[in-house]
Amino acid sequence: MTTVYEIVSKDNEKIILKDIENNSYYKIENTMQSNVNVSPFLEDVKPIFNYILLDDNPDVILFGIPFNQGSRAPLSQVNEFPQLLREASLKLTQLNHYPKPTSLNFFELDTQQTIDCGRVLDLGNIKKIENQSERDSIRKVTDYCLASTLPFICIGGDHSYTYDVISSFSKLDKKIVIWVLDAHNDLFGNSEKLDHGNVFLNIAQLPFVEAIIQIGSRGFRTNSQLIQHPKVIQITKKQSTKDKIEELLDKYKNLDSYLSIDMDALDPIYFPYVDFRVPNGFDKDELLEIINLIFNHSNIKAVDIVEGTVGGISNRGDYDIPVHLLIRILNNFFHQKRSDK
Ligand SMILES: [Mn+2]
């Protein structure tokens, strides 16, 4: 019988393994040469759930975008969100096995269900290369994910980076529909300088973007802040019924889709760690219901989760809601992959 090891940690030189039965540790050489094309644009971090995938055969790819240059909030710390989410995930640490990897899965007590997330590859955080913009690094890594044809998840960062991720889809030469869960419409202000408040005005200008469907807007606006765009369909929080969303899903069912989740879609009672809180948002189950509905009726290629920020304590449960959303998104991607076969 082969000994089964747990993969405890890895760096560029070595991998630490634990012999589960004998409770002893081993150090082996890291001979992995994967992601070599994009590794200059990535910073190695302790992976989500501390789950280390050593081979080149993931079901889904994930990476962090720890930037805040597109935020209008002075001194925004949305760049910290990828790290906070990874820290929060460590409560659900799941060490992968060696030599035969195991799939990442969780048991949800509330529903008494096993939530299978498949094999998840956490590439780390995107980093800025000297003399280049952080946006160049994002495009390099997104191009890599698209070339792999695997679904991927980006953990932001401010909402402006959704533009850079979606820009890479131009290479696919296909129309795409963008689904957005957000308290705001992000269509306001001079679009010459891309930021998180005008990001969807910029995305709407991309010729391969067929439609942008925004769900969850709420609160007050001045007349000058009310912006319409022919490609943008706005469904307020109040209007966001299952029927309404299904009607639109049916309309665009033949196109590829992208899902962008701004953490301020949630009610600040449940998740106050955003820069621009708006009362009367979705609770976790309402948001999950919409996410599941979108996955069930469309062909989602990638997801981003953006605009979370500091203020909570990662090991005290303050970031558990985004971790739960992430688990559900991974699970949806895993199911989508199964049903494609
Ligand atoms: Mn937003």
Image (cartoon, grey):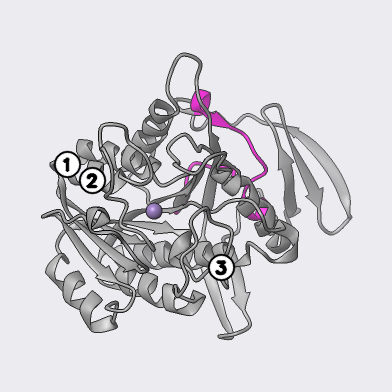
Range shown magenta: 39-59
Amino acid of disc 1: Gln
Of the residues under marks 3 and 1, which one precedes in the sequence? 1
Q: Please, is residue 68 above or below residue 296 in the view?
A: above
Name which quarter of the figure residue 253 lies in.
Answer: bottom left
Cβ atoms at labels 3 and 2 below 8 Å apart = no
Q: Position of residue 107 (x, y in %)?
A: 62, 76
Front label number (2 vs 1) = 2
Front label number (3 vs 1) = 1
Mark 1 crowdedness (10 Å alpha carbons): few <14, some 14-19, many ≥20: few
Quick one: SS at disc 1?
loop
Left-right relation of 186 to 130? left
The residue most toward the top is: 131
Residue designated by label 2:
201
Q: Which mark is residue 324?
A: 3
On the rendered image, what quadrant is the C terminus found in? bottom left
Amino acid of disc 2: Leu
Name which quarter of the figure residue 337 lies in.
Answer: bottom left
On the rendered image, what quadrant is the N terminus found in? bottom right
Left-right relation of 204 to 58? left
